[in-house]
Amino acid sequence: MKKKWIGALLCLSMSVSMLVGCGDDSGKPTSNNNNQESTNKDNSGGDSKDSAETEEGKVLNIYCWNEEFKSRITDHYPDYKAVDATSGTIGDISVKWNITPNENSAYQNNLDDSLLKQANAATDDKIDIFLIEADYALKYVDSEYTMPIADLGITDEDLSSQYQFTKDVVTDSNGTLKGLSWQGAPGALFYNRAAAKEVFGSDDPADVQEYVKDWETFAKSAKTLKDKGYNIMAYANDSYRVYSNNVSSKWVVDGKINIDDNLMKWVEDSKALVDAGYTGSFDMWSDDWKKGFYPEGKIFCYFGPAWLINFSMAADTEGSIGYEGGWGATEGPQGFFWGGTWICAAAGTDNKSVIKDIMLTLTANEEIMKDIVVDDDDFVNNKPVMEAMAEDKKYKSTILGGQNPLGIYCKGVDNLNLGNLSAYDLGCTEEFQHSMKNYFEGNATLDEALDQFYKGVVETYPDLTY
């Protein structure tokens, strides 16, 4: 609670025009009520000028939570020269990386603390670029700390090939675009090819899809897999994003906490799988959850986007399923997305020109985006590029046994509707999963778990009711 009060006091100490979503212990917004129109003032209190008329700064400060964006810059931005692990250069501009891991919302807390000091920070200490994720994007997008993309000189025509959903995530309440991403993150069902052959007689994606094509079929296949010694998933939370991306309402409606029917279907379906012993009760990212990355873990599938299987499933570790090219990909019961990373220009930056060039190079340059697909196995934010590469017989994923999964990703992304995103998503999602875990494991009744959820959310967001 102390951190929350400190955050609130910091917000109150600022002028009304600077109010934004400050972070509590979990990095969730405690105040996010002012959705301001774009103005010609920056956060340093001075008049913003066109980048062509303003001398560029000498230091570019970039805030992020891991090495992914840094690797994209290092590998694909031609003008970047690495100096050491935390710095580089772009021409005569020094680049400084401020990387704080996401665990326990440390990244958001660090970012929030620095943004609160942005107005009075020395020029070379101001944040220039910071990265955000979909779960908490609106916290920053609906604030004056993010600069409109148009103010950098980037036009709608520049972004015409990008997927609309990636723009929707970082469009504020006034319809202003406030960030860009080089990647889409459509999901797929990644399955153990050896298990598929043993249990279903085939590891062909089209054949496997028939066993996971909807949730009823998925549950039946879970029993078949269990009879052969496999759990269909490591934990019920593995399927959460698929259900939550297919809701018909927001977490909060008119200030009241709202649990969508599809989320309650996830609870019902998951409880049945756990009770039957078809899935475990391991926390996501835990060592027990990761056992399924290896053959002896006896896990049939994981749900996720390209980044999950490429960066988070031990594909570089000898003996893992991914290392041996033993995963396959198919659509699964429903299309979904998970995560993704957005680049934001911080209001008050004195490096508009280089930020514009970085954004356009990484998110709109077709040749660079093709290189990212080939070199990094990523799904990039360019519809023509992805559709062409989905048909490219030369493109193969070694992790997926030589399969080209891009057509599967493209199918999933076409039906994405992000109209139900809200600034409360991260807090509500984390509390819902935590509370339902007690129910799944038999430590609480459903009513007790729901009561825990409501009380937990209201503690985080005191302005809400239920």
Image (cartoon, rainbow, N blue to C red):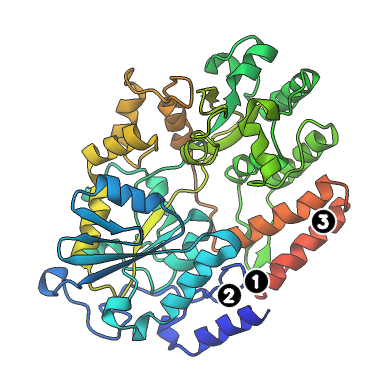
What residue would you read off at disc 1?
A: 461
Left or right: 344, with 427 as reference point: left
On the question of residue 154 being in view, the answer is no
Instruction: Estimate how packed mark 1 is, as few (under 14), some (14 to 19) or many (20 or more) residues with alpha carbons within 10 Å.
Output: some
- As shown in the figure, which amino acid type bears the numbered disc 3? Ala
Label count reads: 3
Residue 418 coordinates in the image, percent (x, y):
50, 49
Secondary structure of the residue carrying numbered label 3: helix
Quarter occupied by residue 192: top right
Residue 191 coordinates in the image, percent (x, y):
59, 25
What residue would you read off at disc 2?
A: 30
Instruction: Estimate how packed mark 3 is, as few (under 14), some (14 to 19) or many (20 or more) residues with alpha carbons within 10 Å.
Output: many
Numbered label attached to residue 79: none
Secondary structure of the residue carrying numbered label 2: loop
On the question of residue 4 being in view, the answer is yes
Left or right: 185, with 161 as reference point: right
What residue would you read off at disc 3?
A: 449
Quarter of the image that includes the C terminus: bottom right
Closer-to-camera residue (80/241): 80
Residue that protrudes farthest toward the top in the picture? 201
Left or right: 98, with 276 as reference point: left
- As shown in the figure, which amino acid type bears the numbered disc 2? Thr
Q: CA distance from mark 1 to mark 3?
A: 18 Å
Q: CA distance from mark 2 to mark 1?
A: 6 Å
Q: Earlier in the sequence, mark 2 or mark 3?
A: 2
> Which residue does the image show at 35% across and 86% down from the upper left?
120
Q: Earlier in the sequence, mark 2 or mark 1?
A: 2
- As shown in the figure, which amino acid type bears the numbered disc 1? Tyr
Q: CA distance from mark 2 to mark 3?
A: 24 Å
State yes or no: discs 2 and 1 in contact (Cβ < 8 Å). yes
Quarter occupied by residue 213: top right
